[in-house]
Amino acid sequence: MNPTTRSVARIRPQGKAALLAAAFTVAVLCAGDIVARSHPFGPRTRSVNDLGNQYVPFHAHLWDLLHGRADGGLYVNWQSGFGSSFLPDLGTYLSSPFAPLVAVFPRDEIDLAVYVVTLLKVASAAAAMAWLLLALRPGRWWAAGLLGSSYALCGWTLADAVYNPMWLDGLVFLPLLCLVGEWARRGRRPFLGVLIVALAWTANFYTAYMATLAAGLVLLLRLWLGDLTRRQRLWAAGRAALISVLGMGLAAPLVTVVYFGTRHAYPGRVRQFVPAPTEDLLARLLPGTYSYGTPAVFVGTAALLLALALPFHRAVPWRPRAGWTLLVVAVALSMQWGPTHLLWHAFATPQGSSYRQTFVLCALLVIAAWHTLSYGVPGPRALGAALLALVLVVASGSERTTRAFTLPLALLAAVGALGGLVLLGLKRRNGRPLAALAVALLVCTQFGEAAVTSAADTRLRLGHMDDYAPWGARQRDQAAAIAGADGWPRYRTDPGREQTVGNDPLLVGGQGAQYYSSLTSDVLSRTLTALGDGWTSRGRNVQSLDNAVTDAIFSVGARVHSPPDPHQNWFPQDGNGVSVTRQDVPPLVTVRPHTDRADGPTDLSGFGPSPYRNQELLLGARVYTVPGFTVRTAAGKPPSPSDDGRPGVRVGALPYASAPKKPTITGSCPAGSELYLWAPHLSGTARLADGAASGAGPAGEPTGRFRSDQPVTKIAPMQRLGTVGDSGRFRVELSPNRTSLVPDGAIGCLDTGRLRAAVAELKATGATSVSVEDGTVRAELPAHSTGIAVVAAPRISGWRCAAGNAPALPAKSHYGLIAVPLYGSASSVTCTFHPPGLRLGTAVGALSLTAVLVLAAADLLRRRVRDRPVPVAPATDRSAPDDPTVRERVTTAQ
């Protein structure tokens, strides 16, 4: 057999195992979604939590970028947050090699595109694990395929990762990184290893970090178990370290950008780690359990039985038996201890799911199961049935298990898995029919429990998390209205206050304040909050602010108004469909007088407690009256003051929404002014009753809707309630659905005439033309302009500006917006954006690439020298030419 034939014969079982694992995994996931009646196989949406709010909209923006339809480019996303840094978001959400596949789907099938990408990722993880198992130990290819699928369909995938598709890249690359370790141990494929490490860290550095730690532990164990000398082990560990460093270096241009983006992001919630109770941890080993805050370590009952059997399987040599068992136990314990838990999460406690490293433990359980099976099916006494029974007994005391569902499913799966493994162990006596029955029993058991678990998790998520409708008629109407009104960059078109998801501008178009990312900048969130905006996710999901003054400040010339999303149904539905209102606004770049303030790049200390006065600071004109007012409870009594130190008074929740007596706010404003209510900690509705000139707002809405909660993860934005009548008196009726706070200075009365005059002044002195290209803003100004040029975009880190032909300097800040000093000699300004960390990352990447190329050239030279034929000098015959002996030797040699 020649080398090529031997190579094909060696790879063929791994290929079959990988194909089986991938096909089996896709079939299980689709079956689970069919049972759950989840999109695209049923009416139930799968867009829960961040999948609907972040990942689908970001993939829609990637679709627009790839098709040349996005506002902005790789550096700046001009659609969100009035201009946000996009490269960190790209590195966090969209840098997977699978992500560009969404471009082949229609734009209005973006939900289906993300679903298909999710299937491909999970299937690829199954195939990669099946390939790894056969690389670690020879064995049955079909068993490797089933165990590869067990890994990909682990509880972590089904409960946590299918709606966080960026995490699935870690699931894919963990077995691949273990393969890189195997190649380093054997001194093979170093450059392919570097490429895999680079792809892993580029795809999602967060889970790649966890996968790299896990692959390092696996390699160290393999080196200890092998028969290498100490010197060979050190060389192998050194090769692996060098491959990892070079691969991470190649990914540095994106990783450093994400790192610095995280440093400049609005701080999220700080959580203290609390280990999961033992009964909960063991319960999550079983099929059909669900929990957001415990490690989902389900890997299938057959794989669990085999992993539990490893310590007792005498056919396995004691060193691998002890080594893999201790590694599984050590990683499981490290998840429950604070310092090592932080180590797994890069020394930052996760704000959401606390056990994001669970896929590592699931991988080790599957590898342990493979080592058990590859040495032969253990006997009935060693199969781990007693330990599984103990797990069931302890887990039955957990709230995660239900006697009506979890325990029967677990017992049925245990019977099927035990029966299949016992029959598989008896096949030698009874031949192929019994072996086929054993395989069929194992396949059916694994398929059934995984599909049922997937369906149960899908259904339970809908009951525990916010969910959002897939693309439909509402989004089509919004997108059409935005496209018809769009005038960027002459003015912005805001998708509207009544949001569908947390990133409406990415999903339906336009350029608004709305933005939701783990990298939402601190300066954006604090600036908009100071102006009266609302947010969710503790400040990282800023909302659209429907306010005439802020629309003028940020050059929002068109605004879409939609009825509340019927999918959310948390308020009565009203409104007559999507509409657009227009407003005369200044250009994107305006000129303001010099101020005595010397703001730093992100200094917001000039803002005060009143959002109305803060808006006036940015507008440069006094346009609000902030009157005194009187608050009364539903019983007509003065309310109690706030009990948490915040200025304001408390109003209690109504027993029901249509209660005849309601809390009220009364006072007086200039006649004809627009009345706004700022109550960030109000939950419910507010309506301008007595004194309204017209009870409806711009979209025909008679009420303002407020959403907030305690502890504070969301606050409500300022709302326009209507126009004050000729008497100047107003009466606002509140309908709180929980105890709420009315702050001091809650009412603002806008003089629309003053606002028009302020806008006219800003237009007269502002830019005559503005052009925007990705990370560059250019504006032509009236000649001899003095003061400061203000770009209506947040002054996030990375902006540098120049007036005229002057050298570019870090941009100044005007109450959180980009500012450029003017001294009368320049008639233009140019601002450019460079993502922080990109230069450093590029330098590290270039250094790594140079090292790789040098090593590749040296390796190529070494191979050529090794393979070069060695010339043989012709033999010198000192004998006489006529010597017959010489003639005989020459003839024989020929």
Image (cartoon, rainbow, N blue to C red):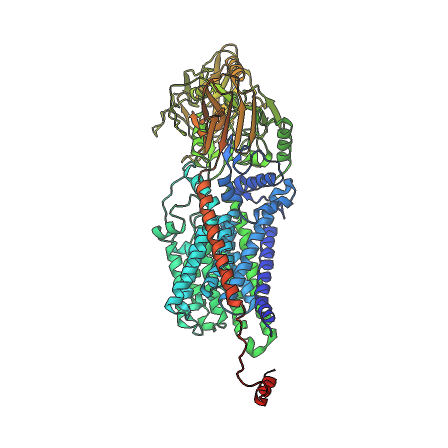
Asked if 277 appears above or below 53 in the picture, the reply is: below
Closer to the camera, 336 or 93? 93
Asked if 251 appears above or below 727 in the picture, the reply is: below
- Residue at (56% x, 56% y) in the render: 124
Closer to the camera, 86 or 668? 86
Instruction: Tell me where residue 398 appears, x and y as whole percent.
Output: 42, 54
Q: How many labels does the image show?
A: 0
Asked if 381 appears above or below 334 in the picture, the reply is: below
Can residue 283 be seen from the camera position used here? no
Quadrant housing the C terminus: bottom right
Closer to the camera, 175 or 55? 175
Quadrant housing the N terminus: bottom right
- Residue at (56% x, 67% y) in the render: 141
Instruction: Tell me where residue 53 appears, x and y as whole percent.
Output: 53, 39
Please state if 303 lies on the left or on the right of 601 as rendered: right
Instruction: Tell me where residue 443 appears, x and y as whole percent.
Output: 57, 64
Please state if 891 lies on the left or on the right of 667 as rendered: right
Instruction: Tell me where residue 607 appears, x and y as whole percent.
Output: 40, 23
